[in-house]
C-alpha cells in the first residue's frame, strides 16, 4: 500500500502548480480544480491546505515577493560592498533595481496583484486576504531594508512607511506602463523611484 503523502509535501506541490497556474492564467481564470488536478490531488486538498482560492493566491504571491526581495537586496548589498558606495550610491542602485523589476520583462506579479486587488473591491473575503498580504509584504521589505548598514538606524515606522510607498509605486507604475507605455516610460519610472528613495532614506 502506498504511503499517504506528508502534509508539507502536498502543500509544496500545490504551491508549485498554483504558481504556474496564476502566472499562466491570471487570478480570475485559474481554478482550484485545475490546480489540484495538475498537482495530482483533489480539490478538497486545496481547501484543506489553504481554505480558499484567495488564500492560496496570497500565499503564492507572498512567497514570490519574499524570494525576489531577498535576491534583489543580496545583489544590491554585494555590489555596494565591493564599490564602497555611500548614500547616493544606495539610492541610485535601489532605484535602478526597482526600475528594472517594474519595467523589464512582463512585470507579471505586480499585474497579477492588481487583478487580485480589483477583485477585492467587490469581494470582502478577497479584500481581507489582500490586506493581510499587503501587511506581510510591507513588514518583510521593511525588515529586509533594516538589515542594510545604511538603514539600520531608521525606526521601524519609517522603514514600514518607506516600504509601503515603494510597493505602491512599483505596482502603480507597472500597470501604467502596461496600459500606456508612451506616457510612463522607464526613465520616468527611475526618476520616480529616485525621488521617493531620496526623500525617504537618511542623510
Image (cartoon, grey):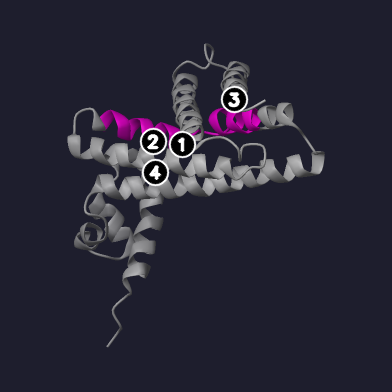
Whole-angstrom CA distance, mark 3 to mark 4, is 21 Å
Horizontal side, residue 39 vs residue 63: left or right:
left
In this picture, is 114 found above or below 19? above
Q: Which residue is located at x 33 percent, y 46 percent?
A: 57
Sequence-wise, the earlier of marks 1 and 3 is 1
User: Residues at badges 1 and 2 in contact (C-beta under 8 Å)?
Assistant: yes
Any magenta on residue 57? no
Sequence-wise, the earlier of marks 4 and 2 is 2
Tag 3 residue: 197
Residue 5, x across and y down, in percent: 32, 75
Q: Dot 2 lies on which element?
A: helix
Whole-angstrom CA distance, mark 4 to mark 2, is 17 Å
Q: Dot 3 lies on which element?
A: helix
Sequence-wise, the earlier of marks 2 and 3 is 2
Q: Dot 1 lies on which element?
A: helix
Magenta span of residues: 94-119
Whole-angstrom CA distance, mark 1 to mark 3, is 24 Å
Q: Give me the disc on residue 112.
A: 2
Badge 3, how many Cα within 10 Å: few under 14, some, many 20+? many
Badge 4, how many Cα within 10 Å: few under 14, some, many 20+? some
Whole-angstrom CA distance, mark 1 to mark 4, is 19 Å
In this picture, is 101 found above or below 2? above
Q: Mark 1 vs mark 4: give the one in front.
A: 4
Tag 4 residue: 136
- In this rendered view, identify the residue nearer to me: 148 or 176: 148
Whole-angstrom CA distance, mark 2 to mark 3, is 25 Å
Q: Quadrant of the C terminus?
A: top right
Any magenta on residue 95? yes
Q: Residue furthest right?
A: 83
Tag 1 residue: 108
Sequence-wise, the earlier of marks 3 and 4 is 4
Q: Mark 2 vs mark 3: give the one in front.
A: 3
Amino acid at each position: 500500500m502506498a504511503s499517504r503523502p506528508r502534509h508539507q509535501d502536498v502543500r509544496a506541490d500545490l504551491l508549485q502548480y498554483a504558481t504556474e497556474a496564476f502566472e499562466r492564467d491570471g487570478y480570475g481564470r485559474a481554478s482550484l480544480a485545475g490546480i489540484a488536478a495538475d498537482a495530482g490531488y483533489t480539490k478538497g486538498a486545496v481547501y484543506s491546505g489553504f481554505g480558499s482560492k484567495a488564500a492560496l493566491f496570497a500565499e503564492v504571491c507572498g512567497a514570490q515577493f519574499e524570494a525576489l526581495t531577498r535576491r534583489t537586496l543580496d545583489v544590491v548589498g554585494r555590489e555596494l560592498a565591493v564599490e564602497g558606495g555611500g548614500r547616493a550610491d544606495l539610492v541610485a542602485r535601489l532605484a535602478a533595481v526597482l526600475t528594472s523589476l517594474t519595467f523589464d520583462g512582463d512585470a507579471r506579479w505586480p499585474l497579477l496583484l492588481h487583478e487580485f486587488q480589483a477583485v477585492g473591491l467587490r469581494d470582502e473575503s478577497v479584500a481581507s486576504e489582500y490586506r493581510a498580504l499587503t501587511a506581510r509584504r510591507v513588514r518583510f521589505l521593511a525588515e529586509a531594508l533594516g538589515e542594510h548598514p545604511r538603514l539600520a538606524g531608521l525606526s521601524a515606522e519609517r522603514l514600514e512607511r518607506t516600504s509601503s510607498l515603494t510597493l505602491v509605486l512599483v505596482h502603480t507604475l507597472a500597470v501604467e506602463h502596461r496600459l500606456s507605455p508612451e506616457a510612463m516610460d522607464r526613465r520616468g519610472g527611475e526618476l520616480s523611484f529616485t525621488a521617493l528613495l531620496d526623500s525617504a532614506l537618511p542623510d
